[in-house]
Structures are given as C-alpha cells and as structure tokens.
Image (cartoon, rainbow, N blue to C red):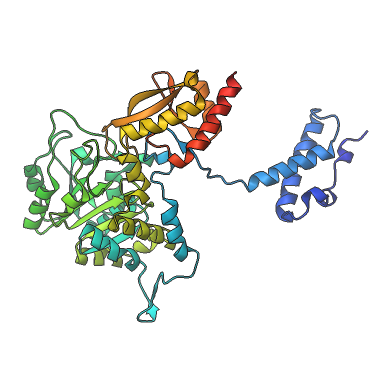
Amino acid sequence: MNKLGDLPKVDKFVTTSLFKGLNQHLLIKITREHIDRLRKDILENKVQNIDENALAMGVKKAYDALFQPSLKPLINATGVILHTNMGRSLISKTLLERASVAICNYSNLEYNLEKGKRGERYEHVSGHLKSLLHVEDVLVVNNNASAVFLILNTFAKNKEVIVSRGELVEIGGSFRIPEVMKQSGAKLCEVGATNKTKLADYQDAIGEKTAMLMKVHQSNFSIEGFSEDVAFSSLKTLAQANNLIDYFDVGSGYLGKLPYNLGAKEPSLEEILSCHTSLISFSGDKLFGSVQAGIIAGKKELIAKLKKNQLLRMLRVDKITLSILEESIKAYLAEEYEQIPTLWMLQQSVESLEKRALHVKSQIGESYCEIIQSDTYMGGGTLPNRKFPTIALHVKGKATVLERKFRANFVIGRIENDKFLLDFRSILPALEAKLITITQKIIEEKQ
C-alpha cells in the first residue's frame, strides 16, 4: 500500500469542522509542517499507519499554542523584590486602572489643549516630577542606560569626562560605563585607584578638554575595607568652581527612608538633589518602584539642550510608560505608598511576614513545612551586598526536585542550605491562596 499516497491533501484537510473559524493562513502553514514531518517519518519507516484524527489534533494543538502568551505571570518566592529576570518593580492594579483611562483612549499626548496645537509629550510627567523632586526640570527616556548615553553625547562629545576607577561599573547585559562613553563620543579620564579616590585626583585631572565630573553608583558590587570615595556634594563644588557640569548616574534612586538601615550607605534622591546638582539620572523601575524609564533631573538650561539632541527621538517613551509613570508619581505626592508594591514589600516587618507564613503553613500542614528566619537582597542592581531580614517557608523534601516542580507551576523559589524555600518578602498576599493550592498539589504528588 502506498502510504505516501494516503497523506491528506492540505486544501481538503483544513476544511474539517475542528478548524472552523481559524485563521486559514496560519492553519495551512502549520498543516503543511505537520504533513511534511509525517512524510519524513513514513520514508524513515518510523510510522506505519496514517491517523488523520491524530494529525488533526496535533495541528489544532500547535495552532492553539501560537496564541498562548509567552509572558506568563509568576509567583516570585525568591525573596528578591527587584528580580531583574522577573520584571523588577510591579505595578499595582489601581495605578494601572487609573492610567488605562488615557491609554485606552485618544489623548493629548502631543497636543496642547490650551493653544490648540502640537504640544510636548514630556509635559505630562514633568510638572509632577518637578514637584516631587524639587528640581528645575526633568526629562524621561526609555531607561537609565539611555539617560547616561544621551547626557554624555550632548555635553561631552569629543571632550573628557572624569570618573573614578572604582566606579567604572559593568551591569547586566555587558553594559559598561567605559564602552558607553566611547559610543557616545565622550572621552574617559580615569582617576584614583580601584579602592581609593580623593577629591585631589579629580582636581589634578581637570584640563582644557574636560567637560564633566561624573559619579557612578556601584550598582551591583561594593568596595569594602581600605577604601575611600568622594561625596557628590564635593564633586559639585569642584565642578562649579571650574565651570564644569556635575553629573551623578544614581542608577537606583529612592525617596524617603529605607528600612533596616539600608540607606546608611545609599544617599536618597533628596540628599543628592539638596546640593543643587547639575544633572542626575536614575531608573524608574528599581527602588523608585514604577515602569522602566530613565529619569533625568536637574538644571533647566541643561535639560533644554538634552531635548534638542536628535537622539532623543530614538530614546523617547510612549504613552503607556508616561501614563503609568505619571500615576506612580501622583501616588508619591499623595503619600499612597501602598500603591508602590516595591516600597510596600520592602517596608513589611518580619512579624507581618511571619504571620502570613504561619497561615500558609497551617493550610499546607505542619509536618510538610517549617518556618525559618533568613536574609535576602533587594536585587535589580540596587543596594549591593546589603542584606535584610525575611521569613521563608521551608517545604520539606529534596530541594532540587521541589524547585523543578514548583517552577513547572510558575512558582519560583530558592534553594538555601539544601532546603527549598518560599520567601514571603516577595510574595504578594493576593497570591497566597494560589500558592497554597499549588503546594498542596505538589505534596500530594509526592505521596
């Protein structure tokens, strides 16, 4: 019997009722792929009989898979609040709903309602941000790397920028300050030693080609022991005395006070801006707790020059980012800190975490888990090497097996001392019921 001759014709096969209402272009493409694979299996004697029903189900399954979202919601039980691999800061549903009013309608994104003509998109966040940060002007680009590049390209192209050797950082994705400077057209002038840089090092390096004194936050590492760096306020004074621009790439800026003494070595945005800095930039989706964005703040005349740089067209943010960022800033101004999930999770006391963990433990069963005290880190290139207390639930069993099973159910925990942990520092209370159900299911599978 000629098995190849029994292969269904594509045009007839796709008319079956199982495929009614489906996109014919996609359906035909998938069908051809499956039939070609089946033809190859027949020629290699891997298939003896053609089952058209099985073929149809396989095609339908492949078709349905195309419409499953690639981005899936996860339960972050690692304890790392700003987990870069899981999207860093969360956006509260309340703020998203507020922002959706503008996002889901036509808006005055670049339309001046008072003048009846073209307006500027950055005005929608600049007013609130200036009030929040107490600065002359602000500009928002798509991330902090863009902010750094734009500032260097605008003010230091073919000129020198003085930076401490201890601040020539590399962050995720091989983003290196020296390489960014090179691509921007600025010329790097390194001063000091890796562990020690003094104000005199900057002073001695200032020359005719110097345009800027730059300080860079050590996002994902720290230098301990015999070390010294220069406070930004001192750099500001030195820059002003030499008619230079002072710029602080803060990386992860925050407002107010951090709990657990985490702000001891991390100056807040209020502290940095109190010295009337020329320019700073920071990420919107780190400790600030909003969307991915690069927020630039400082002197009005400098921001005006940044806006004239042709690169801004490539680095600008869209209406979705601006709408959500505006709602986040308004939440700060209204002191609605509970609407900033990053801050809310960080501010939770150990006692409140333990109370939640005890509830989950009681639902799962006393013999299957135990509560342990542990430490965690903020993550996301913030607060390097600064740990703080947390409470976790140790689910008993082989840690590597449990990690894999929980991950298959979209729960990402962590392994510590050969124990699989669900850390409550980063688990949203609204997801606890779902977590209980998943855990019970996994425990039942073990028995």
- Reply above or below: 208 against 357: below
Report the quarter where the N terminus lies.
Answer: top right
Observer able to see residue 242: no
Residue 438 located left or right of residue 375:
right
The spot of residue 181 in percent (x, y) is 27, 49
Report the quarter where the C terminus lies.
Answer: top right
Observer able to see residue 235: yes
Residue 405 located left or right of residue 40:
left
- Reply above or below: 103 against 359: below
The spot of residue 164 in percent (x, y) is 17, 42
Seen at 15% across and 28% down, the residue is 225
Seen at 51% across and 24% down, the residue is 402
Seen at 35% across and 71% down, the residue is 120
The residue sitting at the bottom extreme is: 115
Question: Quarter of the image holding residue 3?
Answer: top right
Residue placed most toward the observer, 123 or 229: 123
Residue placed most toward the observer, 396 or 48: 396
Residue 29 located left or right of residue 223:
right
The spot of residue 85 in percent (x, y) is 43, 39
Seen at 19% across and 37% down, the residue is 166
The residue sitting at the right extreme is: 1
Question: Quarter of the image holding residue 208?
Answer: bottom left
The spot of residue 255 in percent (x, y) is 24, 50
- Reply above or below: 85 against 256: above
